[in-house]
Amino acid sequence: MPDGRDTPLSIGDLAPDFTLLDQSGSTFTLSSARADRAVLVVFFPFAFSGLCTGELTEIRDDLGRFDNDRVQVVTISCDPSFSLRAWADREAYFFPLLSDFWPHGEVARSFGVLHERGFAVRGTFLIDTDGVVRWALVNAPGERRDFSGFHEVLGDLAEGALPA
């Protein structure tokens, strides 16, 4: 169960802005990134774990559907950036893996997906250029996420018919 925020963000909520470092030490700020295109924010529990590796490999293997002229993908965990760098190098993840290590889980908490044991649950949020959550999916630890709903909503984004 997430702690901090009572419930995860949902469709129509304004996403909290944040700034985190990626696996290469580069700064990522949500408000800057969403100025030009939507952002898919993918929280995951742990680097090097089987289920997380499978999910991020799905993104890597179909990156054009997750990162293109309409949307960009960023992933976030409470792992330190050094672990994320080693994992990204091993798995050839060429998209941002953001570290929410310190203050520990602050961004996951603000999205309502910080587990009481100090890791992010599988929260997935599509944030539009105005900062509004247009699609959200939260899965419990051990429960694989299904990105198909994201792809449907992204199609609506391209057609200008997003749900309010």
Image: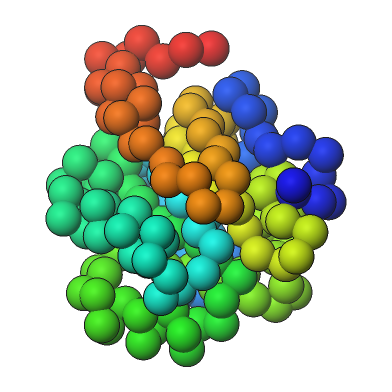
- Its colouring scheme is rainbow
Depicted 128 relative to depicted 57: above or below: above
Res. 149 image quadrant? top left
Res. 8 image quadrant? top right
Depicted 39 relative to depicted 156: above or below: below
Is residue 34 in view from this perspective? Answer: no
Residue 135 left/right relative to 53 = right
Q: Position of residue 7 (x, y in %)?
A: 76, 36
Is residue 132 in view from this perspective? Answer: yes
Residue 33 left/right relative to 60 = right
Residue at 31%, 17% (x, y): give it: 156
Camera-nearest residue between 46 and 80: 46
Res. 152 image quadrant? top left
Residue 64 left/right relative to 36 = left
Q: Position of residue 10 (x, y in %)?
A: 63, 28
Residue at 16%, 55% (x, y): give it: 61
Residue at 26%, 15% (x, y): give it: 159
Depicted 129 relative to depicted 86: above or below: above
Q: Position of residue 31 (x, y in %)?
A: 54, 50
Residue at 61%, 70% (x, y): give it: 78
Q: Position of residue 16 (x, y in %)?
A: 67, 46
